[in-house]
Amino acid sequence: MTTKKEAIDRLRSVPLFEGLTKKDLENIYSSCREGNFEEGRDVVVEGRGGIGLHLILDGKAAVKRRNKKVATLGRGEYFGEISLIDGGDRTATVTAETDLTTLSLSSWSFKPLMEKPSIAKALMLKLCARIRELEKDPTH
């Protein structure tokens, strides 16, 4: 079982949350819920609406795009950070390869946190950095 401290440390490893204070991370953690998914169960489905971020606490998950496996995610990895903010459709299907435990943050739980200036500022700076990186890549 993951402790609160371990979960907060893992939240800190999500690039979107880098730079947040310990207090801000604790606020995010308190808005999260633990999710359990049996082996073979889809956590999110490509093309369907997204409702938030999932941080893997235990287990492994397969990531598929157009029914082709493109990655395997494990402990400490995450998915859904963009839909956390925009609620847009999922760009991949993520299926539990083993029994899977996630720390999940829904967009409706996250929106009130965005009203905190310290969280909003940190997220805007991180998103700006991502845009700048994408603009440097001539293939985009």
Image (spheres, rainbow, N blue to C red):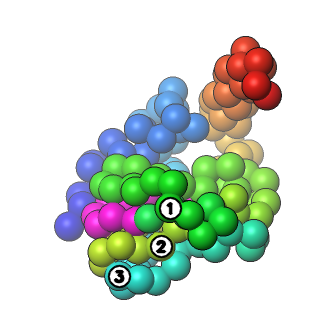
Residue 127 pos. (x, y %): 70, 31
Q: Of the numbered discs in the image, which one, if any, rests on residue 95?
A: 2
**Mark 2 or 3, nearer chain start:** 3
For disc 1, the marked residue is 69
Q: Secondary structure at mark 1?
A: strand
Q: Secondary structure at mark 2?
A: strand
Residues at marks 1 and 3, CA–CA distance in whole angstroms = 16 Å
The quadrant holding residue 83 is bottom right
Question: Range of the magenta residues?
Answer: 51-61
Residue 105 versus residue 95 in the image, above or below: above
Question: Which residue type does callout 2 highlight?
Answer: Thr
Residue drawn at the location 69% of the way across and 59% of the way down: 91
Residue drawn at the location 52% of the way across and 74% of the way down: 43
User: How would you rate the neighbour count of disc 1 (Cα within 10 Å): few for under 14, some for 14-19, many for 20 or more?
Assistant: few
> Which corner quadrant holds the C terminus?
top right
Question: Which residue type does callout 1 highlight?
Answer: Lys
For disc 3, the marked residue is 39
